[in-house]
Amino acid sequence: MRFRLPQRINLVSTILWGLRIVVAVLVLAGSWATLSSGKLSPDTWRDLIIFGIAQGSVYALIALGYTLVYGVLFMINFAHGDVFMTGAMTAFFVARNFGESGFLNANPIVALLIIFAVSMLTSMLVAIVLERIAYRPLRRAPRLVPLITAIGASLFISNSIRGIYGEQSQTYPSVDALQGRMNILGIPILKTQALVIVSAIVLMIALVYFVERTRTGRAMRAVSEDKDVAALMGINVDRIIVTTFAIGGLLAGAAGILYALVFNEVDWFMGFLPGIKAFTAAVLGGIGNIAGAMLGGLTLGVLESVGPFLLLGGANVPSPNQLRDVIAFTVLVLVLIFRPNGILGRSEPGR
Amino acid sequence: MAELISGRQLRRVATIGAVAAVALLYLCMVGLVEAFKDRNVVTGVITLGAVMLLAVPLIAGYRAALPPRDAAAQSLRAPQRVLLGLLVGLIAGAVLGVFVLIASTIDVRGVLVRISPPLLEFLSLGLPSGLALLAITGIGGLMGALGALLLVSPARIRNAVTSGLIAVLFMSMIEPLLRPRLEQLDYTAISDFLYKSHGLTEVASILCFVVGAVAAVLWQPGNDFVRRTVEAAPVQTRRRIRGWTIAALVVAVLILPQVSGTFLAQVAVLVGLYMLLALGLNIVVGYAGLLDLGYVAFFAVGAYLTALLTSPDSSLGIGLPFFVALPIVMLGAGMTGLLIGAPVLRLRGDYLAIVTLGFGEIARVLFESDALRPWLGGVQGILGIPSPFPVRIDLQLGATHIFATGPQVFYYPIFAFCALAAVFAYRLSNSRIGRAWNAMREDESVAEATGVSTVSYKLLAFALGATTGCLSGALFAVQLGSVFPGSFDVFVSITVLAVIILGGMGSIPGVILGAIVLIGLPELLREFVEYRVLVYGGVLVAMMLLRPEGLIPNRGRQRELHEADSEEEQETLDGDLMPQRSPA
C-alpha cells in the first residue's frame, strides 16, 4: 500500500493558514474588546509593562546561556533552566543566614554582592560538571542523543536538589533598602525591579565586551564558526566550550538571584518554566545571536505580563493570569512555526 | 610504594576515589540512604541503605583494578590490583567518615535536610565519632579490595558470586509481592522460612545465594546445550518448539493475575497502560525519529474525550457506552495528532521536541484553567465515568471455582490492547510504511529524493502515535472512573520516553521490557516513589552515554547510533589523520 495525501489540497499549508487567521482574529478581537472596555487604568498598564521588562531581563539572562551554548555546539542545553535553579537555591541559604544575622540590612550592597557571587559560582560549577560528564562524550553522536541526555540531566539535577535541600519552597528575606518605589525619568518604579533591570543591563554589557573584545571571546566566535578550523588555528576547542558553559552558568546564577528578587519564592522546580520561556526568548530573538537573546527576553517578558490582560481581559475570561503560560508557549509555537530563525537570526540552510 | 604502584596509577586511584566519595556523599545527602536504611535485605544483617553504600566502594574498587588502556599498566599483577582497589575504597570511606564526623559536631540540617541524627547514627554504626571514622574508612577499604578481588578472580567465580548476590537482592525485593500471596494461599511455612520482618532470614539468604551461584555456573553450558540441540533439530521440530514457546508465554501472561493476586495485577495494569503509551510513542520516536515531548497531550485527550462522551455527569452528559465512544475517541485523537503534527513537521529535531513540550504544557494548563471549567471541569476534573468491564467474574470449571476481581479483570482488556498495538506496530515496521520511516529517519533529504513523501509519513506517524496514546488514556479514564488534569503533567511524557530509551528505540520487545522495569519495579519499592523521576533522569543520561541503542536494540537503529564510531575507526585505518585521539 502506498500512503499519500491528496495532492491538490495541500493539507499542511491549509492548516498553517488557518492557524495564522485564527491567531490574528483572536489577537485583534481580544485587544479591541479590552481597550474599548477601559477596565484597566493607564497606571496599571504601565506597571504591567515595567514588570514585564523586569521579568524579561531575567529571561534574557537565561536565554543568553542557551544562545551561547547553541552558538558553539548547535545543541539545546535543556538542563540550563536547572543550572539557573541550582544557583538560586544554594544562595538562598546564604541569604537566609544574612537576613537572620542582620547583615543583609546593615550592609545591603556587600551582602547582595556575596549572594550574587555564591549563586553565580554554584551555577557555573554545575554547568561545567554537566558539560564534562553529560555532553562532552557525545559530541559526535546523532543530534537526538545529546538532546535526550540534556532532558535526563535536567530531571536529575532538579530532583537531586529536591532531595538535598528539601521540596518545600523557600522565601528569600526582603531587603529594607529595596522596599518602595523610586522615580526614574519621572516614572515611579519598584526599587527591586529597577535593580533587576540595571543589573541585567550591566551583565549584558559585560558579556558583549567579553565576546567582542577579549582574546577568549574571539576564540569563542571562531569555534562557533568552525570547530575544526579553529582547532587548526591553535585554539583549544574543549577549553572554549567549557568556558562557554561557564559563562552561561554565571549569567544563569545571576538571573537566579534577580528572579528571587522579583518573585521572592524559590523551589526545586523553578527552573522548568523559566527555562522553557528563556529558550523561547532565545528562539524569538534568533538562537545563536546574543543581541537576539536580549531582545527576545524583553519581548517575551512584556508579552507575558501584558498579554493575558490585553487579549483575554476584555472577553470576560475568568482569571486570565492563569493563562499566561499558555501565551508564552503559544508565542514559542508560533515563532518556531512561522519564523524559526527569529527576529534577528540569519537563516541556516540545512540545519 | 614507589616500585609497587607508579605515580600515574596513584593519580588514577585518587580520581576514582574522589568520584566514589562524591557518590557516597550524594547518596546520603539526597536522602536515598535515609529512605532505604530501614528496609531489610537480610533481616538483622544488612539493609538496603547499607547495600547501596557498600556497592559504591565495591564498584569503585573493581573499576580501579580494571586494566587501563596504557600498556605499562597491563602488566600489573593481581596483588597490585587489589592494592589499587583497597586504596580507592579507603579514600571513599575516609571522606564519608570525615563528613559524618563534621555533621555530628555541627548541625547541618538547616541546609542539608536529609542529614538527620538517625541517619548519622546509622552511618557511624552506633560507634563514638573517632571510632566511627576508622570503621567507615576500614569498611570502605575492605569493599574496595573485595571489588578488585572480584576482578582478578577467574570469570566463573566472578559470575557465580555476582549472580548469587543479585539473587539475594532480588528475593528480598519481591517480599511485598511474594509474602502476602504466600500467606493468602496458606503456604505460611514457606513464607516464614523465607522472610522475617520484611527481609530474608539468614538461612534463606544463604540458600538464595547458593541457588543463584549454581545457576550462574550451569547457565553457560546449559544454554549452549539447548542451542546446539535446537540447531541440530530438523526445521519442523524447530518451528514446533517456537510455537510451543510462544503458546507457553501467552498462557503464562493469561494466568498471571490469577497466580499473583490483586496487588501484582494492579501493578500489571499500570505497566500495561504505560506499555500502550510507549508502543504509541515508539511509532513517533522510534520509527519516524521525531522526538515528541508532549505525548501526554494525547493521553489526556483520550482520557478527557472518553470522560466527556461516556460520563453522564460531564458537560455533554450523553453517557455513550464505552465501546461506542471508543472509535470516536480514537478518531478525535487522530485528528488532534494531525492538527498538532501539521504545523511542526518542518522543524528540525530539537525544535520539534521543545514545541511538542510546549503543546503538552498548553494542554495541561487549558485542562486546569477556570476559563474552560464549564466544559472540562477545571481542577475538579470529570467524575462518574462508568466502566464497561465487570467488577467481578466467577467461573465454575468442574470442581474448581475461579474468580477475578478489580484489577484482575481489568488486566485482560489492557493486555489485549497492548498485544493488538504490539502486533500492529510490528506489522507496520516491516511494511512499506515502516521502510519509508526508516529511510526518512536515516536521511530526510535522500528519502525525499527517492520519492518518500516525508510530510505525509510524518503526519501518519503522529496520527498513529496519537491514536495509540489515546487508547491508553481512554482505558486510564475508565479504570479510575474519573479524570483530573493533575494526572497529565510533563512527567508522563518523560516517563514514557525513559521507557523507550531504556528498552531500545524502535524495538517492541525493548519497549515491553522497559515498561516492566521502569514502571513495575518502582511499585515494589514503596520508599522509592519520591526518587522515581530522579532515577528516570539518571537512566536517560546513563543510557545515552553507555548504550544509546537500549537494552534490547533494534538492529537498524543500533547501526545508526554506532555509525559515528565506525567512521572514526575507518578514518584512523585509512591514514594517520588523527594518530593520537585524546584518551579522554
Image: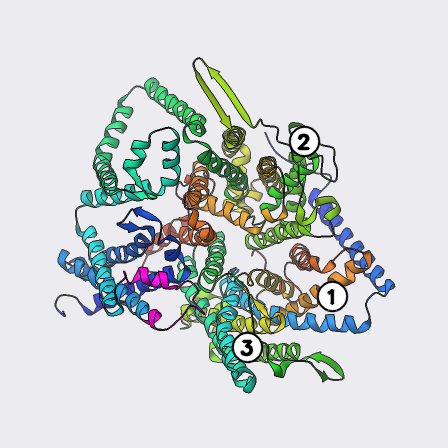
Name above or below for residue B279 compared with residue B36: above
Name the side, left or right, on which A32 lies relative to A286.
Answer: right
Q: Quadrant of the C terminus of chain A?
A: bottom right
Give the label on residue B479, or none: none
Q: Residues within 10 Å of mark 1 (few under 14, many from 20)?
A: many
Residue hosting label 1: A306
Q: Secondary structure at mark 2?
A: helix
Q: Secondary structure at mark 3?
A: helix
Q: Amino acid at mark 2?
A: Ala
How many numbered discs, if any?
A: 3
Which x, y percent locates residue A73?
A: 49, 63
Q: Amino acid at mark 1?
A: Val
Residue hosting label 2: B325
Q: Residues within 10 Å of mark 3 (few under 14, many from 20)?
A: some
Residue B520: image quadrant is top left
For the residues beneath circles 3 and 1, the answer to whether they share a chain is yes
Residue B32: image quadrant is bottom left
Disc 1: which chain? A
Residue placed farthest to the top in the image?
B398
User: Viewer-proximal residue, B402 or A247?
Assistant: B402
Residue hosting label 3: A207
Which x, y percent locates residue B191?
A: 32, 35
Q: Which residues are magenta?
A: B102-126
> Between marks 2 and 1, how big is the CA–CA gap?
41 Å
Which of the marked residues, 3 or 1, is nearer the chain's N terminus? 3
Disc 2: which chain? B
